């Protein structure tokens, strides 16, 4: 057992670093009452996303990932039905990007309210369009080391590696097409640490890696808040 002490000490330090990520911070701003009737549908669209300061040109895979994440949080809610973004684009021409970047929620709401478009959306019972914007960035936080002394007969051990800080931010603006208004917005932010390196215990080398997984956790928190926001009939 004593010979395992260095390994236990080092493993605990790696796990502690990986678990140091805080819970996502949620900021909610409600402008109008919500609620949803049986058969009414929700569509999730992505208008802008950046990675390390660079705008992502092809949003299709990120949009699919975020839309799936939000729908996952709505599982078990029989009153919430989602229309896939591709199905919406078959119904109407939807452009979430303008010439100078993402289209503003106000401009998108106006274009979706045009007569022919609004009629088709009403026939498909599309009640809410959730317009997402997001960003993800990483920054190096330097070298990190850990050690565990084995005492008498314990061989000791150590690790050395690099750490990074992850920052994820996702903002959702909820467009209520039925009432032609913006119902409000929800923002989810999460910062965490990831790292990788090598360790040695009892002269046995081993690699290690831990991840903060900020993107999926920030999205999950956003999805959970969005479900509450739409389901509740509260007013500002």
Image (cartoon, rainbow, N blue to C red):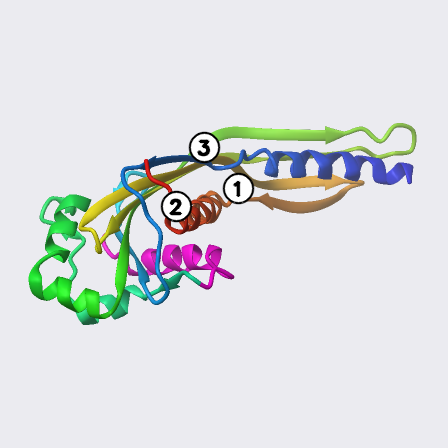
Residue 160 image point, x, y percent:
62, 34
* Residue carrying label 2: 229
As drawn, the label of residue 212 is 1
Residue found at x 16% / y 50%: 109
Residue found at x 20% / y 65%: 122
Q: In this rendering, would 27 be left or right of 85?
A: right
Q: Splitting the image into 4 quarters, where does residue 236 fall? A: top left
The answer to which of marks 3 and 1 sits earlier in the sequence is: 3
Range covered by the magenta-colored residues: 57-78
Q: Does the magenta stretch include residue 232?
A: no
Residue 62 image point, x, y percent:
34, 56
Characterize the local packing of mark 2: few (<14), some (14-19) or many (20 or more) Cα atoms within 10 angstroms: many
Q: In which quarter of the image is the N terminus?
A: top right
Q: In this rendering, would 160 be left or right of 58?
A: right
Disc 3 is placed on an element classified as strand
Query: Of discs 2 and 3, which sits in the foreground?
Result: 2
Query: Of discs 1 and 2, which sits in the foreground?
Result: 2
Q: In this rendering, would 35 be left or right of 19?
A: left
Q: 169 or 29, which lies in front?
A: 29
């Amino acid at each position: 057992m004593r010979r395992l002490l260095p390994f236990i000490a080092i493993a605990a330090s790696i796990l502690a670093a990986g678990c140091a990520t805080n819970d996502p911070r949620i900021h909610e701003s409600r402008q109008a009452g919500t609620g949803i009737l049986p058969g009414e549908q929700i569509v999730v669209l992505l208008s802008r996303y950046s990675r390390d300061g660079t705008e992502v040109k092809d949003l299709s895979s990120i949009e699919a990932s975020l839309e799936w994440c939000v729908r996952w949080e709505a599982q078990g809610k029989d009153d919430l039905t989602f229309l896939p973004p591709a199905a919406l684009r078959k119904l109407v021409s939807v452009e979430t990007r303008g010439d100078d970047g993402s289209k503003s929620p106000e401009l998108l709401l106006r274009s979706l309210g045009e007569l022919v478009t609004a009629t088709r959306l009403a026939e498909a019972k599309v009640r809410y369009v959730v317009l997402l914007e997001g960003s993800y960035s990483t920054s190096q936080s330097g070298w990190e080391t850990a050690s565990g002394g084995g005492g008498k007969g314990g061989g000791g051990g150590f690790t050395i590696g690099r750490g990074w800080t992850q920052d994820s931010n996702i903002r959702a603006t909820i467009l209520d097409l039925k009432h032609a208004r913006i119902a409000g917005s929800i923002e989810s932010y999460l910062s965490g640490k990831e790292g990788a390196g090598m360790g040695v215990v009892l002269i046995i080398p081993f690699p290690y890696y831990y991840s903060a997984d900020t993107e999926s956790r920030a999205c999950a928190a956003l999805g959970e808040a969005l479900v509450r926001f739409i389901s509740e009939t509260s007013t500002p």
